[in-house]
Amino acid sequence: MSISARALNRVTLDRQLLLERQSLSVAEAVRRVVALQAQQPASPYLALWNRLADFDAAELDAAYASYALVRSTLLRVTMHAVHADDYPWFREAMEPTLRGSRLRDRRFIACGLTPEDADALLPDLLDFAAQPRSAAECEAWFVERIGSAEYPSAWRMLRQYARLWHTPNGAPWSFEPRRGYIAANARPMLPGPDSPEAALRTLIKRYLSGFGPASMPDMAQFAMIVRSRVTAAVQALGDELERLEGPNGVVLYDLPGAPLPSEETPAPPRLLPMWDNILLAYVDRTRVIPEPYRKLVIRINGDTLPTLLVDGYVAGVWRTVDDGIEATAFHPLSKETWEVLAAEARQLLAFLADRDPAPYRRYDHWWNKLPAGETRILA
C-alpha cells in the first residue's frame, strides 16, 4: 500500500487530535498524542487547548499535582510531559541516549566523576528525593557528596540523567523557574520493562500510534536514539507492524489497522504553541512544515516558534502583543482563513487572560530576524 505526502499530513493531524477538538480527559489526551514537549511550561497547556473541546487548564494542573502526568527529561533529551504509566517505558528506552549524552559529557566528567561514580551516587540521590526537594537542596546534596561547588554543570548533567520528576510549584503554568524534584520511584507506577530494548519496542509502537506512519529515521529522530537500535527493534517487532510505501518510495511503518483518513479531509486553522511535537517528530519535516519555512520557525538554537497551521501546514507565526495576537503569514491567506484565525485568537486570548497574557514574551527577539510577511493583529 502506498500513501501520499498530503495523506501523511492528514494522518498526523488526526492522530495528534488536530483535525477536530476531542472530548477527552487531559490524561487520556496526553496518552493519545504520546508526549508533550514541555521545556516552556505554558506549551503543554496551549497544545491541549488546540486539541481538546472545552479544555480546562485546572484539569492539567491537577494531573501534574497528583503525578498522573509527569514532567522530566526524556525524548530528544528535552523536557516532556508524559503519562506516569508511560514514564518507566519511555525512560528505559532512552537509557543509552541519556547515559551517553549526560554522563559522558565534558561538563560532567570535568569534576572527576565517571559514569560508574554516578551509578554509585544515584541510589542515595533518589532516597534523598523520596520527598519533594528544591533545586537548591538537591544541588547542596551534590556539592556535599563530591566535596566541591566548582562544577554546577556537573549537577545539571546528573539531574537530567537521574530518574527525577519536576515537582509542580505554582501558577500560572504549574512549573516555574524555581525548580524542584522528586524521585520517580517515590510514586506508585505499573511494572516497568526489563531492558532498554524491550522498552524501545514499546516506545516505537506508542510513537506510531500518535505519529505514524513513519520511517525508521523518523523514529530515531523523535526520541534521539541511534538508528541501529531502532532497526533492531523494528525487526524484532516483525508482524506487529505493517509496511507502507511513502512519497519517493520511502519505507514507512505503522500499526496494523490504524486509521488513515483521506487526504481530502479538511484541516482547520490552528494557533500552535512553541515546540509543538508535530514540528519535531520527523526527519522529513515537510510533512507539516514547507521546506522554505523550516529555518524560519525552528531557529538555529532549537527554539521552535508558535506557528499558524493553515490547511494542515505551517503558514506563519504568531505572538501576543499589547493589542491582542499578532499573526504573520509567510504567504497570502484568504479572507476566510484570516477570519477563522481571528476567531481562534479571540478564544486563545480569553484562555491566556486567566493565566498569563504573554507566555512567550521572552522570545520576541526572533521576530526581528524574520522576513517580511503579511502581518495582522487578530482579536
Image (cartoon, rainbow, N blue to C red):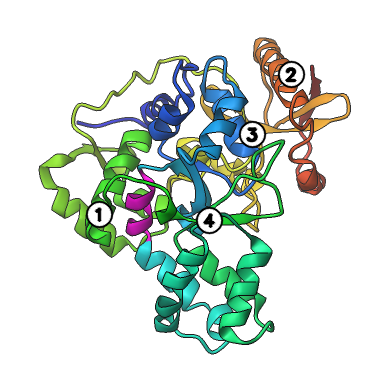
- As measured in the structure, the alpha-carbon distance from the residue carrying label 3 to the one carrying label 4 is 39 Å
Residue at 40% x, 38% y is 34
- Give residue 134's position: percent from left, percent from top: 65, 59
- The secondary structure type at the circle numbered 4 is loop
Q: Relative to the observer, which residue lies in front, 348 or 59?
A: 59
Is the residue 180 above or below the residue 34 in the image? below
- Give residue 90's position: percent from left, percent from top: 36, 51
Residue type at mark 2: give it.
Answer: Ala
Residue type at mark 3: give it.
Answer: Thr
* Horizontal arrangement in the rendering, residue 107 relative to residue 365 (left or right): left
Depth check, mark 1 against mark 3: the one in front is 1
- Give residue 281's position: percent from left, percent from top: 45, 45
Residue at 40% x, 55% y is 185
Q: Where is mark 1, residue-wise?
A: 193
Magenta stretch: give its range: 86-94
- The secondary structure type at the circle numbered 3 is strand
Q: Where is mark 3, residue-wise?
A: 307
Disc sitting over residue 140 in the figure: none
- The secondary structure type at the circle numbered 1 is loop
Circle 2 Cα neighbour tier, 10 Å, few/some/many (<14 / 14–19 / ≥20): few
Circle 3 Cα neighbour tier, 10 Å, few/some/many (<14 / 14–19 / ≥20): many
Q: Where is mark 2, residue-wise?
A: 350
* Horizontal arrangement in the rendering, residue 192 relative to residue 131 (left or right): left
The verdict on residue 9 being magenta is: no
Contact check, label 2 and label 1, Cβ < 8 Å: no
